[in-house]
Image: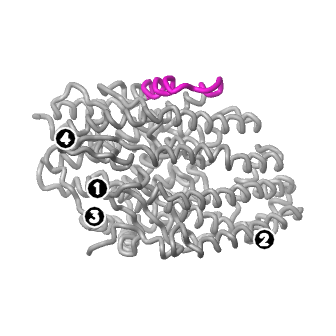
Amino acid sequence: MTYPVTWDLEAIFAGGSQSSAFQHFIKETDQLLVAWKRDVLAATVLTADLLDLMQVIVGRLREASAFTECLEAQDMNDKQAVNLSGKVRALRATFEGVQVYIDQLLVQTADADWQTLLAQEPFATLAFPLEERRVRAKMMLPPEQEALIADLAIDGYHGWGDAYNTAVGRLRVEVEVDGEQKSLSAGQAFNYLHDENREVRAHVFEQWEKAWGAQSDLCADALNRLAGFRLQVYKNRGWQEILQEPLAINRMEAKTLDAIWAAIAEQKSVYVDYLQRKAKLLGLEKLDWHDYNAPLGAVSKKYSYDEAAALILQQFAQFSPKMATFSERAFAEGWIEGEDREGKRPGGFCTSLPLAKQTRIFMTFSGTADNVSTLAHELGHAYHQYVMDDMPMLLQDYAMNVAETASTLAEMIVMEATVQQATTKEEQLFLLDQKIQSAVAFYMNIHARFLFETRFYEQRKQGLVSTEALNELMLQAQKEAYNDALAGYHPHFWASKLHFYITEVPFYNFPYTFGYLFSAGLYAYAETTDGFEDKYIALLRDTGNMSVEQLAQKHLQVDLTQSDFWRAAVAYTARDVAKFMALTEEE
């Protein structure tokens, strides 16, 4: 089939950023918020009506946020989309401000009355997220102060995130490729960093660093202010640990995170051996930053969008027919924005529209194998949301780490199958290398981000951190995370990586590694388990209803706070390195 390469937003709200239907939707949502706020402030106990309206508003805000995110991403010069996004954020801030009074109702309810309430519907069904809110509310400031924080965050905290996005939208990377001068957006230039020609990679990377260096002072301002805002809020709440919020958001214990990094550290030398072998294959003493994602061999074919879709659907069908059927619908109905054009935001994402019961996937597809993996990854996210579409809105609120489990498993399905089906040594080596690159990203690149961000926050407590200091922090984190296995690094990575500037989620890094390893464990489990497809759906449907430790215990019968599960998952992925080393032994 021939699938549309641009998405359909008209099916959600016709008219794009000029949509009168969306303006009306925003106005209605505002009116609902006003009514809900009035009722909440007058209430002395949480009622079913208050809870029902809360879920209605949650769904509408998610719908509005997803739509404006799509508008901004598809055209970073769409000023009206930015204005609409600001309006939605203002509504979200109002909602968050009212939520603190909901939290007050939860906290002031006596324990015995609370248990009685949870025995009734709709509270019984929503017991986990409600209990979670009640526990967290006890660690917050008085509601008036929390509401003030939410209001100030609009133009302060979130405003700095918007300023960063504006800088990225204006950034141009000036390069010469194939004798032609090109002025590339950040998203377009990023794709060239994976080019099979080392001269092209090296040149584009040099210009990439130069471009981000020119924007680094503005980026440093944004990063410092974002961190400063968070630290002030944490200090006033009496929170001592910088990881308290990100761990709570991801519904996981510190012991689990420690167990993950410990398991990776034990076997990281395996991946250093891989990097050294790849350097030898490329005729280098050591890989540079722009080399470790370089394709190996002449098998680095370009995929058309339709070829990528066919490949993904075929592999999904062998693992999960239900996921394949869903993904075919996403392709056919134009849920995916993949066109390679000017003005788009860099990176990729999947966002859900819970009222329309649809999702939208954003990326820039240029035909690389990495693009195919990204497409599979985002479809994994979309499928996760799809299997939860019929659930109450509060139970659809799953954490980033389990979200990354679904996406990474989908990516792994495609990569594993293509490696096994390779008909030549060259093809197998190329695909195996692509697969191992994912492990390097999660074990080393993500680790570098985690180390950088952890240390940056410690320095930020003492005052503003300069551009030069940020560069040095990043270099040291990268050298440590990669066991100093590279010849050159990316000092301005902290400026170029959008994830450091996302205001909704702090520490947008370690959940990826959790998701990768948890999905590896799931993949191994699937190989020895009958009826895995339905069991997998059951696990996904529970992701908004328990901690990750409870989730793993219920569905896999494993203890995530111990290193055993993680150690086995790392070893499972390391089998690819063993195959790679065997294939290249005589090279």
Marks 2/4: CA–CA distance: 62 Å
Q: Earlier in the sequence, mark 4 or mark 1?
A: 4
Magenta-tinted stretch = 459-477
Q: For this view, does 140 lie left or right of residue 393?
A: right
* Residue at (51% x, 53% y) in the render: 402
User: What residue is pinned by disc 4?
Assistant: 197
- Read off the residue under disc 1: 366
Q: Which residue is labeled 2 in the image?
A: 48
Q: Where does residue 154 sit, x and y in percent of width and height?
A: 68, 50
Mark 3 — residue? 305
Task: Report, in whole angstroms, how far the alpha carbon at label 3 lies from the one at label 2.
Answer: 48 Å
**Three-letter code, disc 3:** Tyr
How far is disc 3 from disc 4 in space, using C-alphas? Answer: 22 Å
Amino acid at pointer 1: Ser
Residue at disc 3, secondary structure? helix
Distance between the Cα atoms at labels 1 and 3? Answer: 8 Å
Residue displayed at 77% across by 36% down: 236
Q: Is residue 86 left or right of residue 71?
A: right
